[in-house]
Amino acid sequence: MYLSGGQKVPGPGSPRPPRPGGSGAGLASLQPSPPGVPIRGAPRPGGMAGGALLALLALRALRAWAHPQCLDFRPPFRPPRPLRFCAQYSAFGCCGPERDAALARRFGALAARLDAALWASCAGYALDLLCQECSPYAAHLYDAEDPSTPLRTVPGLCQDYCLDLWQPCRALFRHLSPDRELWALEGNRAKFCRYLALDDTDYCFPSLLVNENLNSNLGRVVADARGCLQLCLEEVANGLRNPVAMVHARDGTHRFFVAEQVGLVWAYLPDGSRLEQPFLNASRAVLTSPWEGDERGFLGLAFHPRFSRSRKVYVYYSVGLGLREWIRISEFRGSEDDENTLDHGSERIILEIEEPASNHNGGQLLFGDDGYLYIFTGDGGMAGDPFGKFGNAQNKSALLGKVLRIDVDGTERGLPYRIPRDNPFVDDPAARPEVYALGVRNMWRCSFDRGDPVSGAGRGRLFCGDVGQNKFEEVDLVERGRNYGWRAREGFECYDRKLCANASLDDVLPIFAYPHKMGKSVTGGYVYRGCEYPNLNGLYIFGDFMSGRLMSLREKPGTNQWQYSEICMGRGQTCAFPGLINNYYPHIISFAEDEAGELYFLSTGVPSATAAHGVIYKMIDPSRRAPPGQCQIQPVQVTVRSRLIPFVPKEKFIRTPESTPRPTARAPTKAPRRSRPSAARPAPTPRPARPTKRPGGRRGGGRRRERPGTTMQAPSNGAVRLVRPAGQRPGRGRVEVFAGGRWGTVCDDGWDSKAAAVVCRQLGFAYAVRASKAAEFGEGRALPILLDDVRCAGSERSLLECTHAGVGTHNCKHQEDAGVVCSHEDPDA
C-alpha cells in the first residue's frame, strides 16, 4: 500500500519492521497455545472502570475532531453481530467476529503461560490491551497511520495508566510483546512508560475512551466548524474530455461506461482499466465545439434494463446542418463480435426535436422501474423561454421543456416507439402524448431512487436538478402529470408575474432551491443507496457546475421537508487513508452510481469538449464503513478483445489542518447546457490574491474588470479595441466598437470565430484563437450596447460591415458582452 505521497506502508497482512531492538515480529506473531477460557470481570487495578468503557459509545452533540482508522487503513464499522470477547466494541470498532475470536484465543494462550497469582492481578489489563486492536482508533494507538515508524506491538498508553500497570503487571509484557527493547526497560518504571507513550496524547489508552472531542460523534458523518459534512474521494478515472455521463449496464459485469461530450463512450472494467477501443464513437455525427461552455454535444446514454438479452443502448446527442440544430435520441445494438462495443451501423433514430437556440439542450435518458424510457429536454434556449405566448415549457403541444416518457419495446408497423397508456395527457388533443411532466427549464442530471436497501422506502422517486435563470437553482421531485412552474416561477419565486398569478398554473414547488450567490448551475445527483457507507443511506448528493459546491439533502421523516448540508473535503487527517484524496476539479458536470450503488461525480478543470482535464471521483465516508466482506461483488466475466489501458491515479492528498474548501471554479465562456442569465449579474465576490491551485490543475480565481481606456485621437467608425482585465496577456479581452461617435460593447450570444477573426485582423493579429462569450473578460456596464446579433463571413473589414441588429438595437444584457483571444502564432501549428 502507498500513501498519497508515494511512500510505501504495509497493507493488511504485510510484515512491518520492528521497533528498534524488537524481534521482528508484529502483532500477529504470538502463536497462541490451545485456547483458554476468557476471564470476564477480572480485576484491573488502576485500569478503566466499566462506566468509563461505556463512555466510548456516548454520542453527544459536540464537534468532533476524530479521525477513526483501523489497522487495515480503513474506517471502522459496526460488526454484523455482537462481539463475545471485546464486547465493548460491539457497537462500533475495527473487529468482526473472526478477529474477536482470534483475540480470545490469544487471551487464552496468555492465561496458560502465566502463573495464577500474576494472572489474577493482570487479566483485566491483558484484556484491555488486546482489545485495542478493535478500537476505532487502532491505527493511532499502534502508530499504523505513520509510515515512518514501525507498527507497535503494544498500544500507546497514557502515563498514569502505565505507571499503575507497571507495579503489578510489568512481567505481562514478556508474553504480550516480542519487543526485546521493551523487555530491557522492564526494571525502569519511567523509561518503560515513556517507551509506551504516544506523541499525540489525545489518543493514548485509556484516556481516548472518555475524550468527548473524539467520541461525541464517533461513527457518524461529522460536520466541521462551518457545518460542512466531511467526506473524502477516491480517483477512479482521469484524462477525460468533459465527461458528461457515467452509467452501468445492469448486467452483472460491473463495468461502467463513460461518455465524453465529443461523442466517445469508453468502457471500464471493475479493476479500473479502460478498453483502448471505444464502446461507441459518434463523434462525426455529434455537434459541439471547443468553446468552453458549449452546451451541445453527446449528452446522455442509457442501457436497456434487459441489456444482457436485448443488447440495446439509447443515446442523446446534438446534431446540426447549416443553421438548423436539433437533438436526437437513437438506439444502438451491441456488436456481434465484441461485447465491449456497439454496432455503429445499427443506429435507429427514435426521436428528433428541433432546437431554436444552441443552449438548453437537456440531455438525460433514464429507464424507470416501469421499463419506459424517460427523456429530459430543455426549453429551447435563450433567456426567459421566449417561444410562443407562454414559452415552450408551458406548452403541452411542444416537446421542449418537458419530461417525456415513451415505450421503446414491442413497437408495431415500424413505429420508433409507443405511448404508454397511463401517460397523463394521452387523451388531451392539445397535448403531445409523450409528455410526462412539464414546466421544465433545463433539467441537468436526474436519477431514480433505488430505495432503502432493507425497507425499500423511497424506491422509484425521480430527482432532478433544474438549472435556473438569473436568481435560483432548484431540485425537483418529478411526478406524473405535474407542472414544475417554468417560466412562471424560478425556484420558489415568480419570474413571469402575470403567468405566475394564473390560478390554473397548479405548479409544484421544488424540494430545495438556492440563490446564485451559492452557485449558478445545478447538477442533479443521486440518493445514496450503496452498501459500503451506511451513514450515507438516504442522503441526496448533488452539486453546482459554476461554484464547485457539493451539497446534500436529507428528508426529515414524515414532514416532506428536506435538511440541507454542504459537503466539503475532510479536515486535518480525516482523508489521510492510502489511496484517498481531499480535493477535486471544480466544474461538476455529472453524478453517477455504479452497479452496486456506490456514488461518483464527474468534473473538470477546463470545461471544453476538447480539454482532457476530466476526472471521475468516488465518494467515501471516512467515519464508517460496512463490515468487511459484506459488500463483496463477483462480476460476471467479459471477453476482452481490445488492449487494456491500466488506470494510473494522478491526484494527490493535500495536507491541511482545516477542511479543504471548495475549489475555486474558473468561470467558462458559458456553462455547458446553460444559458446566461438575462438580468444583471451581481458584483463578484472578492477572491483571494492567490487562488487555490489544485495539484495538476489550473489556477482558479475571478477576473477583475477595468475601466475602458481612452484614445488620444478620434477613432474611425467601426474601430475596435480590447479591454483587458488585470493580469491578462495582450491579444485577449472584451471587444468594444466605435460607432455613431461613441464607444460601446458587442453583446451577442451567437458570437463566433468568424466575427472574432474580423476583430483580430483589425487589431493587427494574424489569428483568432477563440471567440469569447458571456463576458468572460468582464462587462462594460459603463458603456452602451452598440451591436447585437453580429454575423460575419470573416472577410469583412469591420464589424459594421457584418450583418447585425442595427447600431444600438439589442435584446441582451452586458452579461453577454463578447470578447476575443488573438495571436500572432498559428494555434494549430
Image (cartoon, rainbow, N blue to C red):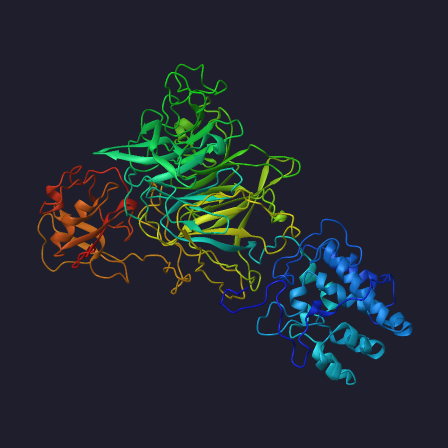
Horizontal relation, residue 564 to residue 29: left or right: left
The C terminus lies in quadrant: bottom left
**Left or right, 801 with reference to 687:** left
Question: 807 or 474, which lies in front?
Answer: 474
The answer to whether 356 is drawn above or below residue 693 in the figure is above
Does 745 appear above or below 694? above
Percent of width and height locating residue 167 = 84, 79
**Residue 769, x across and y down, in percent:** 21, 53
Would residue 521 be seen by someone viewing this image from the given angle?
Answer: no
For this orientation, the residue located farthest to the right is 117
Q: Is residue 476 left or right of residue 172?
A: left
Residue 514 at least partly seen: yes
In percent of width and height, residue 766 lies at 13, 55
- Occupied quadrant, residue 721: bottom left
Examine the rendered structure and indicate whether residue 419 appears above or below residue 802.
Answer: above
Q: State the residue in front, 797 or 592.
A: 592
Quadrant in the picture for residue 107: bottom right
Residue plotted at (61% across, 49% down)? 533
